Amino acid sequence: MNIIVCAKQVVDVSEVKVDPSTNKPVLTGIPKKISDIDKNAVEEAIKIKEKIGSGKITTITVGPPDAKEKIKELLAMGVDEGILIPAPEEFDYHVVSSLLAGAIEKIGEYDLILCGEASIDMFSGQMGPRIAGILNIPQITYALKTDASDDRIVAERNLGDKMVTTESTYPALVTVTKEINEPRLPSLMQILGAARKPIHDWTAEDVGKAGLSAMTRTLDVKGVPMERKNINFEEDLDEAVPKMVEMLAKDGVLN
């Protein structure tokens, strides 16, 4: 079982502040980490490998050189090797998905590709489906649970108002939700052992995707002001609850 996990280094969105004078997010000095749901994808890959009993897990990241430090965290969890591809100066979903797909094609032998359903910074949900489209392989999205065997994978999918069970033969791509598992914390020995695992530096030329250019541009990024009304209901519970419900309904929070 050869599994590939696509992971993204992002800013820790819980640390992002908004400049009140410009209404723009302040990203300078914000710590970075692997996107939370991508870690769920890594954990699921490790669980599948443990169940099958053999195989290899490779993680691919498109990002700056400092992303290597975050890839080491995934190696400590149980990933066997990492691949880092530098992003061009201007990039979008088209560029990144093409680079990831090119790296997967260069790897050649794989059964399963796992991705988080979305990254915690942009949360577009585009990357997994784009990669599957480029590679022309089946995809299963929003998996809450997986059951992998030697020749196929079965996934329970959350579609909002219903649950759907879908299966696919290999190769296939699966995007997972945050609810699928709880990523493990590596031990000290695993952290030390990660230093001996390889992280390969591949370029766009190496993966056959030289000369890519972005098809979209981000024109502006603005923060969303979060203001509270700070209304206190000091009546006893029987009187306060109807008043609160009436006020929420008037503000459009309740129908």
Image (tube, rainbow, N blue to C red):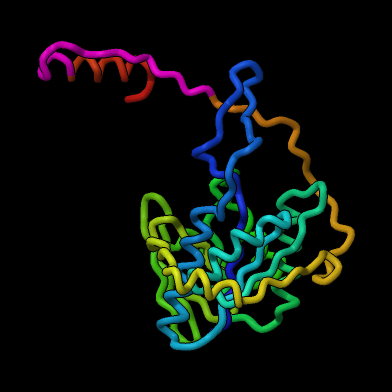
Question: In what quadrant of the picture does the N terminus appear?
Answer: bottom right
Q: Which residues are magenta?
A: 225-240
Quarter-of-image position of residue 216: top right
Question: In what quadrant of the picture does the C terminus appear?
Answer: top left
Q: Position of residue 131 (x, y in %)?
A: 67, 64
Q: Position of residue 246 (x, y in %)?
A: 26, 15
Quarter-of-image position of residue 28: top right
Query: Principal SS element in the magenta part?
Result: loop
Measured along the vertical axis of the image, is residue 229 above or below residue 112? Answer: above
**How many numbered callouts?**
0
* Residue drawn at 55 percent across, 26 percent down: 224
Q: Position of residue 129 (x, y in %)?
A: 62, 60
Residue 205 is covered by the magenta coloring: no
Q: Position of residue 219 (x, y in %)?
A: 75, 32
Please name whichever residue, 90 or 250, is drawn nearer the observer in this view of the structure: 90
Q: Name the side, left or right, on which 15 lies relative to 249.
A: right
* Residue drawn at 49 percent across, 39 percent down: 14
Measured along the vertical axis of the image, is residue 126 above or below residue 133? Answer: above
Q: Name the side, left or right, on which 206 lies relative to 21.
A: right
The answer to whether residue 42 of the structure is visible from this angle is: yes
Measured along the vertical axis of the image, is residue 53 above or below residue 81? Answer: below
* Residue drawn at 49 percent across, 82 percent down: 152
* Residue drawn at 56 percent across, 82 percent down: 56
Please name whichever residue, 5 or 113, is drawn nearer the observer in this view of the structure: 5
The answer to whether residue 172 of the structure is visible from this angle is: no
Please name whichever residue, 62 or 158, is drawn nearer the observer in this view of the structure: 62
Quarter-of-image position of residue 229: top left
